[in-house]
Image (cartoon, grey):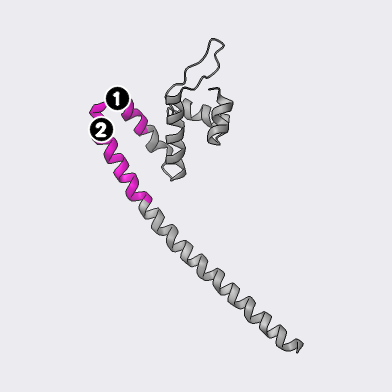
Amino acid sequence: MMIAEVSGKFGLSQDTLRYYERIGLIPSVNRNKSGIRDYTEEDCKWVEFIKCMRSAGLPIEVLIEYVGLFQQGDTTIDARKELFIEQRKQLLTRMEDMQKTLERLNYKIESYEQSVVKKEKELKRSED
């Protein structure tokens, strides 16, 4: 699969895909005889994984560390698991913070809606 196809499939720019490969987030992508990137199904799984983790807020540095550990083989399984456990804790904290923010926004929106309804009632009374 060419880079344009991968870009479209995952909603990432071609520059982002090249950057991810350059910094080691995606293991080196094979190239065809013309030197053009030719993504395999395995490469696409890495792209999907990285996109998922990034959308959850995992830092690039952590993902680079994970990929490096993965490439070292099974001796790093425990380290990879610990890395994910720590990231899960941080994600849960962010989700709790986001839930509090959502509740606050909902409260503010409700306050504004009540204010508008009150003003509309006052306007209607003044028209009568």
Magenta-span inclusion, residue 67: yes
Three-letter amino acid code of the residue under disc 2: Ile
Q: CA distance from mark 2 to mark 1?
A: 9 Å
Magenta residues span 65-91
Residue 119 on image: x %, y %:
66, 80
Does residue 111 appear left or right of residue 23 in this picture?
A: right
**To which residue does mark 1 refer?**
72
Residue at point 54% right, 70% down? 108
Residue at point 45% right, 34% down? 48
Task: Indicate the secondary structure of the residue bearing disc 1.
Answer: helix
Q: Which mark is residue 104?
A: none
Q: Which mark is residue 77?
A: 2
Screen quadrant of the C terminus: bottom right
Pair 2/1: label in front = 2
Three-letter amino acid code of the residue under disc 1: Gln
Residue 12 on image: x %, y %:
55, 35
Mark 1: give few (<14), some (14-19) or many (20+) Cα within 10 Å.
few
Task: Indicate the secondary structure of the residue bearing disc 2.
Answer: helix
